[in-house]
Amino acid sequence: MFHINENYQKMPGSYLFADIGRKVREFSAANPDKEVIRLGIGDVTLPLAPAVVKEMSQAAEDMGTPEGFKGYPDYEGYEFLRRAIKENDFDPRGVEVGLDEIFVNDGAKSDSADLGEIFSKDCKVAVCDPVYPVYVNSHALAGRAGDYLPEKGEWSNLIYMPCTEANGFVPDLPGETPDLIYLCYPNNPTGGAITREALQRWVDYALKNKACILYDAAYEAYITDPSLPHTIYECEGAKECAIELRSFSKNAGFTGVRLGYSVVPKELKCGDVSLNTLWMKHQEFTFNGVSYPVQRAGAAVYSPEGKDQTAAQVAYYLKNAKAIKEGLEAAGYTVYGAENSPYAWLKVPAGMTSWQFFDKLLTEAAVVGTPGSGFGPHGEGFFRLTGFGTYKNTLAAIERIQKM
Ligand SMILES: Cc1ncc(COP(=O)(O)O)c(C=O)c1O
């Protein structure tokens, strides 16, 4: 008789975005004349850049010729893409990353969950609170998180590191020593950024405690402050203690195309065993790579036209985020983020929960955002709005909120 992975049964019943979707559907059914503006889910809205489309189409055409046909791709990604990544994302920052340390994937979500598989079952995991939920869910399913405690909104065996107004949404070093530490900057959901000095403190802490940092830099393209680090490997010693995750979703609109990569350095070791070797084995055993047209499309992001066109997309979303921040501040709200991030993290009015504010915004302004409590207990009292809508809708949403 087979048995199921009981950890699936421990997962809390409802999914944040499913709850939001249900509420919006109910509202729209009851108010068919009201146009709902969605600034909730973190999906992009602009079409793919022309340089990307051209290259993806050309690659598809090539696949239809005897000379251009490709079968299974390399597990770690085609060299042309890994080289473009190295030469554009790392070399200009003075960071030495080897081609064999870059692993192309179908987006950061998969690897942020799957990387857990190369670590022992009994590793203690630390996550920011609030947090991008995938890190928590993957460890819960793997049995590392313990039991879900509904009254606290926490898992019994995770270390939660509060990210608050007081610490500028960068967690303090934890009291209990973790083995795995998830950091994400610029941050989803708070929109916060991390300075090089603060990130170096985390690297030093990880080295001292023989912990591994999983650094999610999916929003790196949104950094506008030139003093901020774009990669954790700008910190001294990071190659001995950190894996970095990158995505093409938010810098180039690949949410529907699916492409990302992870950097697993050779120097990152447990005893004599390099995690790079383990991750290569993981990819060989369980992954068949990313399609050729998608990898060609990814390489086009680094072409001169691709760089200009995707930078313009990022600037567009940043303009939306800035408009949200300034518009809501003018209406008396306290708003964080939205400067090095597409996310605005606003404080809900005193005395309200983040779900109550969600309902108020939906019913009074027909605007959809994301309640902060959905990202963890310390998200309570906050609300996430994204710059990923159209500029027109963003301005309309701001005006409606100002009138509330
Ligand atoms: C922090 C963070 N990491 C990873 C991802 C997933 O990105 P991808 O589309 O590359 O899977 C997201 C998506 O919203 C995210 O917010």
Image (cartoon, grey):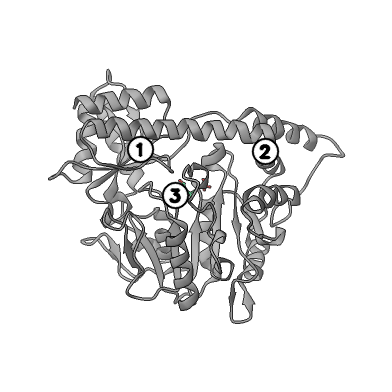
Q: Give how far across and how far down residue 38 sits, in percent.
A: 35, 31
Q: CA distance from mark 2 to mark 1?
A: 28 Å
Residue on which disc 1 sits: 40
* Above-or-below relation of 106 to 99: above
Residue type highlighted by circle 3: Pro
Q: Position of residue 397 (x, y in %)?
A: 31, 26
* Figure quadrant of residue 287: bottom right
Judged from this view, the residue extending furthest toward the front is 227
Q: Which residue is mark 2?
A: 297
Q: Quadrant of residue 137?
A: bottom left
> Which circle's residue, 2 or 1, is located before the other in the chain?
1
Mark 1 vs mark 3: which is more N-terminal?
1
Give the SS element for disc 1: loop
Secondary element type, mark 2: helix
Q: Nearer the viewer, mark 1 or mark 3?
A: 3
Question: Could you tell me which residue is drawn at 49 percent across and 66 percent down?
Answer: 213
Residue with the mark numbered 3: 186
Seen from the viewer's position, the closer of residues 351 and 171 is: 171
**Split into 4 quadrants, where in the image is the C terminus?**
top left
